[in-house]
Amino acid sequence: MPYIKAARRPDLDPLIVALSDEMVDHGELNYCISRLAVLFLAPLLSQGKKVGYKELSAVHAVLQDAADEFYAEPISDYEKQKKETNGDVYTELRGI
């Protein structure tokens, strides 16, 4: 995750918390993430700059990196707990 400087978090966290308090389902989370991506790029257009592959690809990379980090942290931890509780389904493949 591309961590930001601690000094910026107090400016951003209240906005993020207020937004998350308003969301009621996964669709709204998806909408908010998509709108943030669009609104991040919109100033380029309003400044008469081009939004091309480079800019779109960079935003896609940020979204993918965030998804990867989310998987690596809470989801991976959850899956490890479940494997310990329920057993490893891949036992025969260990050591490949």
Image (cartoon, rainbow, N blue to C red):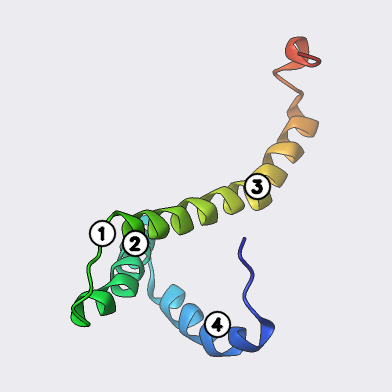
Q: Residue at 76%, 24% (x, y): give it.
A: 87
Q: Upstream in the sequence, badge 3 or badge 2?
A: 2
Q: Label 2 amino acid? A: Glu
The type of residue carrying mark 4 is: Asp
Q: Are marks 2 and 1 in contact (CB under 8 Å)?
A: yes
Q: Nearer the viewer, residue 26 or 76?
A: 76
Whole-percent x, y for residue 16 in the image: 48, 78
| Residue kind at label 1, given as amino acid type | Gly
Q: Which mark is residue 13?
A: 4
- Say above or below: 17 vs 58: below
Instruction: Give the vertical position of 67 relative to 32 (above or below).
Output: above
The residue sitting at 68% across, 83% down in the picture is: 6
C-alpha span from label 4 to label 1? 30 Å
Dividing the picture into quarters, in which one does residue 89 lie? top right
- Sequence-earlier tag: 4 or 3: 4
Answer with left or right where residue 19 lies relative to residue 95: left
Q: Mark 1 points at which residue?
A: 52
Seen from the viewer's position, the closer of residues 36 and 23 is 36
The percent coordinates of residue 27 (x first, y second) are: 32, 57
**Element carrying mark 2:** helix
- Residue 75, image x, y percentages: 63, 46
Reply above or below: 36 against 52: below
The answer to which of marks 1 and 3 sits earlier in the sequence is: 1
Q: In percent of the image, x 35 and y 57: which residue is there? A: 54
Residue 72 tag number: 3
The tag earlier along the polypeptide, 4 or 1, is 4
Q: Which of marks 3 and 2 is in front?
A: 2
Residue underneath mark 2: 55
Separation of residues labelled 4 and 2 (CA atoms): 25 Å
Q: How far apart are marks 1 and 3 (CA)?
A: 30 Å
Pick the residue in front: 3 or 21.
Answer: 3
Would you call the spot at circle 3 few (<14 residues within 10 Å), some (14-19), or many (20 or more)? few
